[in-house]
Amino acid sequence: MPTERRIAKFRRVLANRQPDLTVVCENIHDPHNVSAILRTCDAAGVLQVHLLYTEEAFPELGKKSSASAKKWIDTIKFRNPRDLRQHLKDRGFTIYATHLGHRSVSIYEIDWTKPSAIIVGNEHRGVSDEALAIADANVYIPMFGMVESLNVSVATAVILYEAVRQRLQEGRYPNPDLPNDWIEALLKDWLER
């Protein structure tokens, strides 16, 4: 039986969740990278992570590298990019793919306070053409060194924390849009985990 202190922590964490901010992991090969992404998502208040795996097997996620974050982040699996797009669009998300191209926009030019889904891709291939096709826009992280990319879990953290910064400025932590009955329903679920 959870203590009152533990229940109070659950309520506090749930009150900070951001259901309109999500990450899509596309064909990320290393499960440690996916686990690190889940850990960052939990820290940033992300409620769900979408796994789009069209070429790779869905990752086996261990407790060690995620520090048990997988217990508190719901993962939704997809094999078809079009199905994922429909799922996200039905929920009002703008879809951003991390991709460096001539029409890509800096992450600092995006309004992350709006419903946003961020597609991050495979460690070697990046975001696939199929996933780029479902995105509304491409974003990049400004970099000034010789190396032109970051580790996928680091890149995800950089982007999420720009979203956190913007949402903090707008007073979204705790999230004023979350109804109390929504928090209580999730609390009941979390108490059973």
Image (cartoon, rainbow, N blue to C red):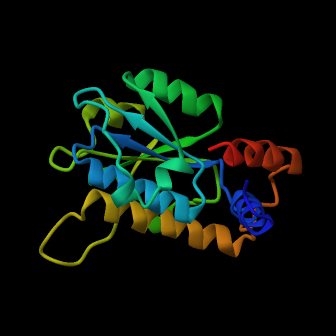
Residue 102 visible in the shown view? no
Q: Is residue 137 above or below residue 53?
A: below
| Residue 33 horizontal side relative to residue 178, left or right | left
* Outermost right residue: 180
- How far across and down, in percent of the image, does residue 35 sit? 37, 53
Place of residue 63 in the rendered image (x, y in percent of width and height, measured from the top left) = 39, 53
Residue 167 lies in quadrant: bottom right
Residue located 72% across and 57% down the image: 2
Q: In this view, does 157 lie above or below 188?
A: below
Residue 188 shown left or right of residue 79 in the figure: right
- Please name the residue shown 44% across and 63% down the image: 159
Residue at (41%, 32%) from the top-left corner?
Answer: 134
Q: Quadrant of the C terminus?
A: top right
Q: How many marks?
A: 0
Could you say where residue 21 lies in the image, as x and y percent from the top left? 58, 51
Taking the spot 70% from the left edge, 62% from the top edge, the residue there is 16
Is residue 148 visible in this depiction of the protein?
yes
As drawn, which residue projects farthest toward the bottom?
145
Camera-side residue of 55 and 69: 69
When asked about the image quadrant of residue 11, the answer is bottom right
- Viewer-side residue, 33 vs 20: 33
Q: Residue 115, percent across and down?
A: 62, 48
Snapshot quadrant of residue 111: bottom right
Of residues 61 and 98, the one drawn nearer to the viewer in this rendering? 61
User: Residue furthest toward the left?
Assistant: 146
Q: In this view, does 67 lie to the left or right of 123?
A: right
